[in-house]
Image (cartoon, grey):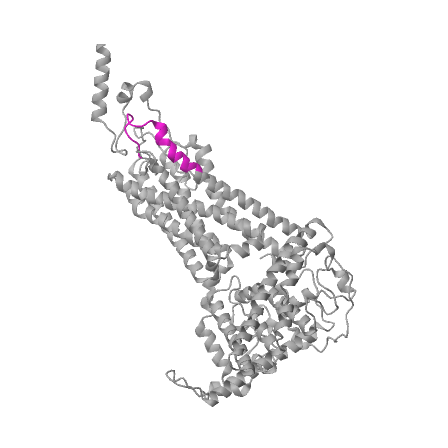
Amino acid sequence: MASVMMYNSTLSSVLNDSLFVDVENFTLTENFTSFLPPRFSVKPRILPGIVRGNHSVELDHTDQLRATNDTEHYIVGFVMIIMAMLGIVANGILIHSVLRTSVFGRFYGRLLLHRSMAEVVSCLIIATFFTPYVMISSSISDSLNIAFTTMFAFSLSTTYLIHFLVAVNRFCAVYFPIYYNRSSQALWKQAAGHLLVAVLAGIVTSLSFFFKCSQFVFSRRRYDILALGCDYSDHEFSETKRMITIVVIIWGSCAFAALSVDLLTLGRVILYTTIMKSTVSLSYRQNLRFFLQSFSLNIVICSGVVTTHVLSDHFDSSFTRFWFSLFHVMLGFILNGVIPVLFNSALRDMWRRRNATIVSVASKMRAALSTTEKICFNDKKCVFGRELYKCRLCRFEKCLKVGMNKKGIKALVKDEIPKTSPDLKIVKASQISTERDTLISTLNKLLYVEEKIAHLRYSTYFPYSTSKGVLDYFNDACAISNTRKHQVLARFAKPEAFLLFNEEMASSGHKFWMYLDLVLAIEYYKTMEIMSRLSRLDQIALLKGTLRQVASFHAAYDAYIRGHTDLVEPNDFVPFSHPHFRGEAFDRWHSKSCVRVCAQVKPTLDKIVLLKSIIALNPNAPNLSVYGQEVVAKERLKSTNMLMSLIRVERGGDEWISYFSRLYDIVNRNILADLCFSDLIFSKVIPLVSSRSDMKVEGLWLELLVQ
């Protein structure tokens, strides 16, 4: 009994004198541990850590923490501050790029923005709190440590959740493109997604407050996040460990789930590359870019998880653990900001815009309109190429050829057009005459181009190719400038109902009219003055984003002009009329076609060419830069105003408003028809091509369908 009382007295004295409030400075001595009974025995243990940072958690605050010298503290602190600053710069560049490009208008861009903002907050906490705490050997209050570490855990939870959401976003875009285009662009759905991420991140972070002593703190000796811990008489080890283990599992699940989803998505893309052999080079570059962007980041994240979980016994010191835990977190922050900018041309486009500012474009326009003598150094044989543009003289003569009013240009240069005061709502007669001349000149140009396109459509012209893409046709010489070599045909042979068009049918004299309309749409863009004011990337973005809509409208109004009320080709063939394609998607596509609306509204050809210009100048085309969107929007507004002026002159009173509304509804109806056509392609054509090795989709179509 005396020995038991002496044991209890000694234990009580030691516990009262050595309550472990200061976790960092407290050390269990060998003598102290010898007094503890078996259930109080302490065995040094480090919880598996996580994830991108593989945070290891030390439950036992009375554990012997190996003392590291000041040199290690300074090395770790120096690395932390450098990596944190690099992370801030990298994510700042990404935020700036997303805000300046059209990617911000899409759900994917907003996800990148949200993730980068969370990582900037994490880097700021590392730079302002973790680094000074490691390098300066001074104790801080537990409440301050808990506050900063909890904010870090919240931002890190947000990063992991968004990383998984980005992977799901890519998965849906590849596997369900129609549903993705229709549903993911709604602002309220995007806002709901970001709000859900914030709520889930808050729930994950709040798990650390479930028990009294399970809050997160940062340890300057372990260079990692630990649990705060309490007196052993208050809580068992398992209670302190439970919540942080759950958080570790959630973070790790998000990391490996994102990797798994990206593997599935990449498999789908590679499958389409194998099937569609006609565009293997383009698809290969797209697959490579996707692979580098997705897996280089996932490998860094998941390798940290594996090293800490599987190889944790090989870490002999906290200094070694740092390179496989917190260093991986900061490396992930940097890669998250750098990889999207390196592998996304829409984000890099902003930094190239400095070579073509508004000032430089304006100066070139003034020089082109000047009255000084223009000289061609290529003997008037300038041609358009990938990086070669026509000289001033050749550009000027081309504009005159398509209907530009030379006298109007001289009047504009000499400032001869009368102006009215902005305070007076008076329109002078001379200004009305100028607006009328502008309208007539624009209509003459559009009607001239439309006449040339109609000549090509009903002639022997048919540049069919299974391998050529958008850029290949765009870089070719303009076919509109040389229509005489193509003879107009009186009638065209009607083919039997076929599954997919092929080279054998093309060689036998048949035309694939939907493919021809795409090529003619590219030729139409070559005549537009706005293309010379756009950068190469914006030109490609505008083409890929609107070609299908222009071609769809072209086929619709051509059928209307020939007297049809449904989509019928010039050879009296109904596209995709084979029994295999019949069904709900086929009926929906034909019912939403613009042919029936045109038959009801009965637009004349001058209104049709203005509607075609409005459809072609869509500022919402994907991947257009901010500058490109502004230029296209201004040009589209001009066509809209011309259409309004034309209808106002013809109908007068209030009747023109109703007619204009019905006429402009054709633009929206055409977009809906294009979506229905995409639904038909992905529900009928793609499965057919996937199951038949002797069939393939043309490279031009594939490039426009799979973007």
Q: Residue 206 occupies which quadrant of the picture?
A: top left
Q: Is residue 392 visible?
A: no
Q: Is residue 44 magenta?
A: no
Name the foreground residue: 173 vs 375: 173
Residue 638 location (% of width, % of height): 51, 76
Q: Is residue 539 visible?
A: yes
Name the foreground residue: 202 vs 489: 202
Q: Residue furthest front?
A: 654
On screen, residue 166 versus residue 58, left or right, reads right
Question: Residue at left 48%, top 48%?
Answer: 165
Establish if 451 lies above or below 284.
below
Q: Residue 482 occupies which quadrant of the picture?
A: bottom right
Q: Which residues are magenta?
A: 228-249
Question: Residue at left 24%, top 13%?
Answer: 4
Picture quarter with the N terminus: top left
On screen, residue 343 versus residue 70, left or right, reads right
Instruction: Count the labels in the image.
Output: 0
Residue 298 location (% of width, % of height): 49, 44
Establish if 45 lies above or below 190.
above
Picture quarter with the C terminus: bottom right
Name the foreground residue: 206 vs 263: 206
Residue 368 location (% of width, % of height): 51, 81
Residue 273 location (% of width, % of height): 63, 52
On screen, residue 338 versus residue 232, left or right, reads right
